[in-house]
Amino acid sequence: RGLVALRDVWEGQELLFVPNSAILWPSKARELRIGEDLAARGASQGCLLAVCLLLAEKGLLDTSEPSQLLKLRECYAATLPPVEDCGHFPLFWDLERSADLLAEVERCFCVAQPAAAVVFEAIEQLQERIDAEYQLLRASVASLRSSREAEALDVSRERYFWARTMVLSRSFSNPNAVVGEEQGRGGGYGDDDQMFLVPFADL
């Protein structure tokens, strides 16, 4: 990512400030019953972050927080590309058009057909993995249907794929994440989170 600056920018100069409380972490989802249920079912951090985004979009991520914060996240979700503009993302490719897609992969990635086939296979596996996550979400929603969060997450496969696409394309990695044997022992918020979404910083 890069920016075009119309004036001098000094090293270390603050260009944008987003309060830590506005950041979307997988931990935020785990604080909710449905997030806890999903985590127990083995949901990935990407899945939990997608759940955060879908709830933030409806102002339901954490209703105990200040209304300005809920509105900020809601506005952020509204600025993201709509589903109908996501056809170029691999999660939305129709893999039944394999011949056309292989040619498209060759053109977009500037690779020969054997390499394009490898890319195509990786995309197919990604779609299967995200579809499995969606089935997890469906099972969790069904088991907690009476909760407001579950009702808000009763979304279509296309809508979940949209949220996962936003996570895949816009999330930041957490260089301070506590992983491996130490996972779960961090003292700060988000210590166990490998990724997060920062409203309006994913230019």
Image (tube, rainbow, N blue to C red):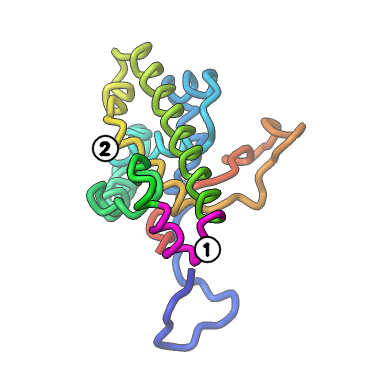
Residue under numbered circle 2:
58
Q: Residues within 10 Å of mark 2 (few under 14, many from 20)?
A: some
- What label does residue 63 carry, if any? none
- Magenta residue check for 105: yes
The picture places residue 169, in percent across and down from the top left corner, at 44, 53
The furthest residue to the right: 181
**Left or right: 54, with 113 as reference point:** left
Rendered image quadrant of residue 137: top left
- Where disc 2 sits, the SS reads loop
| Residue at mark 1 | 111
User: Looking at the image, which residue is at 63% across and 41% down?
Assistant: 191
Q: Main secondary structure of the magenta part?
A: helix
Query: Residue at horizontal 29%, vertical 13%?
Result: 146
State the image coordinates of residue 44 (x, y, percent, origin top left).
53, 32
Q: Label 1 amino acid? A: Val
Assign the C terminus to one quadrant of the image: bottom left
The foreground one among 89 and 39 is 89
Q: Which residues are magenta?
A: 102-114
Specify the quadrant of the image occupied by residue 151: top left
Report which quarter residue 32 is drawn in: top left
**Outermost residue to the bottom:** 7
Q: Name the amino acid type tagged 2.
A: Lys
Q: Position of residue 135 (x, y in %)?
A: 40, 23
**Disc 1 packing (10 Å; few <14; some 14–19; many ≥20):** some
